[in-house]
Image (cartoon, rainbow, N blue to C red):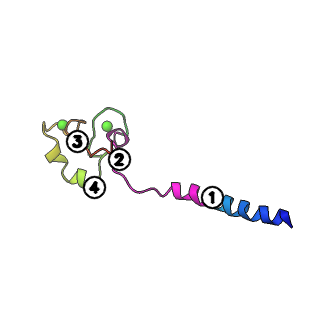
Amino acid sequence: MKKNLIALPLLVLSAYSLTAVAADDDRPQRPPSFEQMDTNGDNELSKDEVKGPLLDDFDKFDEDGSGTLTEDELPEPPKGR
Ligand SMILES: [Ca+2]
Ligand SMILES: [Ca+2]
């Protein structure tokens, strides 16, 4: 009898951790960092590497008209800390 009493919370616990792991894949969308967008690692973002609103305003951000965005030209997303 005692065994069953112990097994139930254990089952609930393992179900909970499974859910927690699955939820980890589903974290809220954050804007990618410069490093994440710079897929070829040349420290500049080409139009191939940006998307969305950044691509729409690419020429506006590209202040020196080089056709690529450096980290300086990229508007810095507000940092949490
Ligand atoms: Ca690049
Ligand atoms: Ca540029």
Which disc number belongs to residue 32?
2
Could you give the CA–CA distance between mark 1 and mark 3, rounded to whole angstroms? 39 Å
Q: Residue at x 38, y 55 (%)?
A: 29
Disc nearest the viewer among 4 and 1: 1
Density class for disc 4 (Cα within 10 Å; few <14, some 14-19, many ≥20) is few
Name the kind of residue labelled 4 in the image.
Answer: Gly
Query: Of the residues under marks 4 and 2, which one precedes in the sequence?
Result: 2
The amino acid type found where label 2 is placed reads: Pro
Q: Is residue 79 magenta?
A: no
- x then y, percent, for residue 31: 33, 50
Amino acid type, label 3: Leu
Secondary structure at badge 3 equals: loop
**Which is more N-terminal, label 3 or label 1?**
1
Residue toward you, 16 or 51: 16
- Residue 35 in percent (x, y) is at 35, 38
Q: Secondary structure at mark 4?
A: loop
Span highlighted in magenta in the image: 19-38
Left or right, 15 with respect to 51, comes to: right
Marks 2 and 1, how far apart at CA:
27 Å
Between the residue at mark 3 and the residue at mark 4, the CA separation in whole angstroms equals 14 Å
Mark 1 — residue?
Answer: 18
